[in-house]
Amino acid sequence: MNVYVGRAAVGLAVSALTVTLAACGGADDGAAESEGAVKIGLLLPENETARYEKFDKPLIEKKVALLTLGKGKVVYANAMGDAARQNAQVDMMIGNKVDALIIDAVDAKTIAGAVAKAKAAGIAVVAYDRLAEGPIDAYTSFDNEDVGRVQGKALLEALGDKARNGKIVMMNGAVTDPNAAQFRAGARSVLDGKVNVGKEYDTVEWKPENANSNMAAAISALGKDKITAVYSANDGMAGGIIAALKAAGVNPLPPVTGQDAELAGVQRIVAGDQYMSVYKPYPREAEAAAELAVTLAEGDKIDGIINQVVSSPTTKRVPSVLIPGTSVTRNNISSTVVLDGVFTVEEICTDKLKATCEEIGLK
């Protein structure tokens, strides 16, 4: 990732996202003065990961409604993990004459031609969560290399002076997702030279069942008593990895990382099966995407929204909003996902987990 704006700007810009534009005399003023009847296309990549349907879609819809005084419309489609389907959905959005398009690409390279078609049709394109190739107008995501660093630091903390003992397994995300390479790079920048990597995998389509198969192969190759930790790029894969470890009779479980702070992941953290996850405040990312899309749709400048500039393999210096993530362990569930209203204590602490929740002060 090529970043041209210093990190000092991140905190200021991110905090600004939580303030409505009306309060700072920004794009809401323009929305109030115009008809506000913009049409925003939203294309999400899959529904295997819980966040997309539960958080991203409703959050973007809510922010678009707020910015357009209820007159804006979001046209939604999910690609169900199929890159060709997503390309066809771009054609559908062009046919629907959307004013701007938010795309979370299934395959960052494959989407490039569809992005070019949308641009040729006069539609502004915002790459969401993954840096799509092609002539995108803006990009918003989390600071992906920093996410990897957070994961790597957590593993080192969990291992302590045993970091050099045994082998760790690296379970990266899908090669079709540029974020996966950035997560890996961030984690490697912390772990290289401090741990011994025994096996490393790129997990097809981020699927938990593929991570499960990879983990079973790693256990067979390395031996169940030789694996000291597992770097898992997200929570869904962590679930598959932990299932494979348990099936092999590994006890105690080694520390396993995650990302997305999904409910199942947080519950595994409470239970002691998963060591940590990375909480990424989806409202900030979703609000940024909605602000970028509405502002571009209305023909206004986005300079006051962006906090960084990044480059994809096809497009240089893309105006961007990058947001930092936070490590979630048993020690700070209350002050992260519960405090922000992502999950309630009641949702996390099922009957099976109530006693453990009380032990760690989650009540």
Image (tube, rainbow, N blue to C red):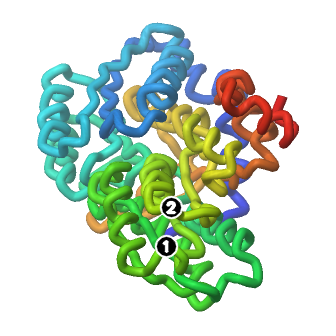
Q: Is residue 102 above or below residue 224?
A: above
* Residue at horizontal 19 percent and vertical 34 percent from the top: 90
Q: Which residue is mark 1?
A: 224
Q: What's under tag 1, amino acid-wise?
A: Lys
Left/right placement of residue 111 relative to residue 188 reads left
- Badge 2 vs badge 1, beta-carbon distance below 8 Å: yes
Which quadrant, please, contains the N terminus?
Answer: bottom left
* Residue at horizontal 20 percent and vertical 49 percent from the top: 111
Left/right placement of residue 255 relative to residue 298 reads right
* Numbered label tally: 2
The residue lying toward the viewer, choosing from 147 and 219, is 219
* Residue at horizontal 71 percent and vertical 24 percent from the top: 344
The residue lying toward the viewer, choosing from 244 and 46, is 244
Q: Which residue is mark 2?
A: 249
Q: Residue 35: x and y, percent?
A: 43, 10
Q: Is residue 210 visible?
A: yes
The residue lying toward the viewer, choosing from 209 and 138, is 209
Which quadrant, please, contains the C terminus?
Answer: top right
Q: What's under tag 2, amino acid-wise?
A: Gly
Q: Secondary structure at mark 2?
A: loop
| Mark 1 surroundings: few (<14), some (14-19) or many (≥20) residues within 10 A | some
Left/right placement of residue 291 relative to residue 47 reads right
- Dot placed on the residue nearer the N-terminal end, 2 or 1: 1
Q: Secondary structure at mark 1?
A: loop
Q: Is residue 19 visible?
A: no
The residue lying toward the viewer, choosing from 94 and 48, is 48
Distance from disc 2 to disc 1, alpha carbons, whole Å, reads: 8 Å
